[in-house]
């Protein structure tokens, strides 16, 4: 009932006619203008097809999910504020460009979110990165905050929150609550995510209407164990152990 129908579309560059393009299942759309879904390009769909495949071994899973994470970071940086910035080139001419405005930091939701730290470091030299550990409480089966280590001046920074999987949204919502409690304004948080469920997007984006979310793909739904379907299994297990 909560599982959305798949959207199958021709995928390829605009200059090819539809009958020259293969079809593939692309991301479900969403109604929130705070949510950006990466363009469903042949490259992205091919990368996702590798990491979704249960036969993909750990080395390839790491390599290809890192590729997708890099695409997410590159897109995410476009949502940070910039100011006009003119520089002088070596030939003595001015170039009217831009500079990023304000400091940033990363915050990963452990353990799977730590897999996204390297992609952020590759794009943002010597970026500060904090961590939040949230796990399901055995008794209440609700997410519980176990540990956090965040930059002291986090309230003065833009925060790139990192978690590859957005299932029910429980952990991500709790992580944002922690950031808000440290004085980070909602509109200065940017959530970077590889794969989301429609329910996760709905819960998260409704709770935080000023927070931007960038995801590579919104999937069909959740199974009875709250795994994303069709999904890719347990991201942390596949990245760190399997
Ligand atoms: N976390 C995962 O690693 N996989 C899912 O499908 C959902 C949450």
Image (cartoon, rainbow, N blue to C red):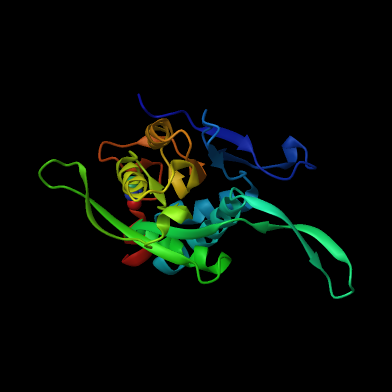
Quadrant into which the N terminus falls: top left
157 on left or right of 133: right
Viewer-nearest residue: 48 or 102: 102
Q: Position of residue 139 (x, y in %)?
A: 10, 44
Image quadrant assignment for residue 131: bottom left
Q: Which residue, as the protein is rendered here, is positioned at the far bottom? A: 90
Q: Is residue 53 visible?
A: no
Looking at the image, which residue is at 76% across and 41% down?
Answer: 14
Q: Position of residue 53 (x, y in %)?
A: 44, 53
Looking at the image, which residue is at 82% across and 69% down?
Answer: 88
Above/below status of 44 relative to 88 = above
87 on left or right of 100: right
Q: Position of residue 155 (x, y in %)?
A: 42, 53
168 on left or right of 211: left
Above/below status of 32 relative to 56 = above
Quadrant into which the C terminus falls: bottom left
Looking at the image, which residue is at 36% across and 27% down?
Answer: 2
């Amino acid at each position: 009932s909560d599982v959305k129908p798949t959207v199958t579309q021709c995928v390829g560059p605009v200059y090819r006619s539809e009958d020259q393009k293969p079809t593939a299942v692309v991301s479900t759309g969403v109604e929130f203008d705070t949510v950006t879904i990466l363009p469903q390009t042949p490259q992205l769909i091919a990368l996702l097809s590798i990491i979704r495949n249960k036969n993909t071994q750990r080395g390839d899973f790491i390599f290809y999910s890192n590729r997708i994470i890099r695409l997410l970071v590159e897109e995410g940086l476009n949502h940070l504020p910039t100011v006009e910035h003119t520089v002088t080139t070596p030939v003595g001419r001015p170039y009217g460009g831009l500079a990023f405005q304000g400091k940033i930091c990363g915050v990963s939701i452990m353990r799977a979110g730590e897999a996204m730290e390297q992609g952020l470091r590759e794009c943002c030299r010597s970026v500060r990165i904090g961590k939040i550990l949230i796990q399901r409480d055995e008794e209440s089966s609700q997410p519980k905050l176990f540990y956090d280590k965040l930059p002291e001046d986090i309230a003065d920074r833009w925060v790139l929150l990192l978690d590859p999987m957005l299932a029910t949204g429980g952990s991500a919502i709790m992580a944002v609550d922690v950031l808000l409690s440290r004085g980070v304004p909602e509109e200065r948080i940017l959530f970077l995510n590889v794969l989301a469920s429609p329910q996760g997007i709905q819960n998260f984006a409704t709770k935080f209407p000023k927070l931007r979310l960038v995801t590579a793909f919104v999937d069909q739904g959740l199974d009875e164990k709250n795994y994303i379907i069709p999904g890719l299994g347990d991201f942390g297990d596949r990245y760190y152990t399997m």
